[in-house]
Image (tube, rainbow, N blue to C red):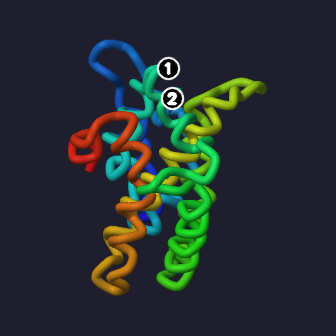
């Protein structure tokens, strides 16, 4: 067996590992090339498992909290969704500088698979956005040593998850 085939086999074994209770979480059903691309850039699925488990267990009440936060006109005194979108693009630019330009599109696509089917509700889109921001924040924290403002951007992007799921939610997810 050649080196690339052995590596692919190892990824398949890790990626498709069975769950003890027979349930397969959405992030075990990803498109294999996306899984390989994430691993290639240094972010295997295992780095996002806790965050994806938090998404998997999201309740409607938490989605409604996120929705209120995202759609309050003008934001609130602490957090503004317009500023979060601007910071998202700043983090994307930093990822591009550090050679991770594929990561945001792969993460967005994979998080969207948590809601299969042709119809996405407004609440589902809001949840996808905030979990995408949290995944970006997780990567941004890894590069904060190169650019200290990434730490601030990561905190800002994680705010909706902290508000809807509790302050300790991301400590469990990181």
Query: Could you say which quadrant of the image residue 139 lies in?
Result: bottom left
Can the viewer see residue 162 in this picture?
A: yes
Q: Position of residue 154 (x, y in %)?
A: 39, 64
| Quadrant of residue 112 within the rendered picture | top right
At 22% from the left edge and 41% from the top edge, which residue is drawn? 168
Side of 156 relative to 66 (left or right): left
As drawn, 170 above or below 89: above
User: Real-space Cα distance between discs 1 and 2?
Assistant: 5 Å
Please say if 173 is above or below 157.
above
Towards the viewer: 118 or 129: 129
Quarter the N terminus occupies:
bottom left
Q: Secondary structure at mark 1?
A: helix
- Badge 2: residue crowd in 10 Å (few <14, some 14–19, many ≥20): many
Badge 1 crowding class, 10 Å Cα cut-off, few under 14, some 14 to 19, many 20 or more, is few
Q: Residue at x 52, y 27 (%)?
A: 64
Q: Secondary structure at mark 2?
A: helix
Q: Say whether residue 34 is visible.
A: no
Asked if the residue at tag 2 contacts the one at tag 1, i.e. Cβ–Cβ closer than 8 Å, the answer is yes
Residue 84 at x, y = what percent? Answer: 54, 61
Percent position (x, y) of residue 161?
40, 43
Q: What count of labels does the image hold? A: 2
Q: Nearer the viewer, residue 150 or 20?
A: 150
Q: Residue furthest right?
A: 118
Q: Which quadrant of the structure image shows residue 128? A: top right
Residue at the spot x=33%, y=22% of the render?
Answer: 19
Of the numbered discs in the image, which one, if any, rests on residue 63?
2
Residue 25 vertical position relative to residue 48 in the rendered view, above or below: above
Q: Which mark is residue 60?
A: 1
Q: Return the residue nearer the eye: 113 or 84.
A: 84
Residue drawn where x is 69% and y is 26% of the image: 121
Identify the mark at residue 139; answer none if there is no mark.
Answer: none
């Amino acid at each position: 067996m050649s080196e690339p085939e052995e590596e692919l086999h190892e990824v398949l074994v890790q990626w498709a590992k069975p769950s003890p209770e027979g349930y397969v979480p959405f992030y075990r059903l990803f498109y294999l090339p996306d899984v390989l691309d994430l691993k290639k850039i240094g972010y295997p699925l295992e780095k996002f498992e806790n965050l994806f488990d938090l998404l998997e267990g999201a309740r409607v009440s938490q989605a409604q909290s996120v929705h209120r936060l995202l759609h309050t006109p003008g934001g609130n005194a602490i957090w503004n969704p317009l500023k979060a979108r601007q910071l998202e693009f700043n983090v994307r630019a930093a990822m591009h500088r550090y050679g991770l330009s594929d990561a945001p599109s792969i993460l967005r696509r994979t998080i969207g698979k948590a809601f299969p089917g042709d119809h996405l509700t407004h609440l589902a889109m809001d949840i996808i956005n905030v979990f995408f921001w949290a995944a970006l924040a997780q990567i941004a924290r890894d590069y904060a040593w190169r650019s200290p403002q990434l730490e601030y951007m990561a905190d800002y992007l994680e705010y909706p998850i902290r508000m809807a799921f509790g302050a300790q939610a991301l400590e469990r997810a990181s």
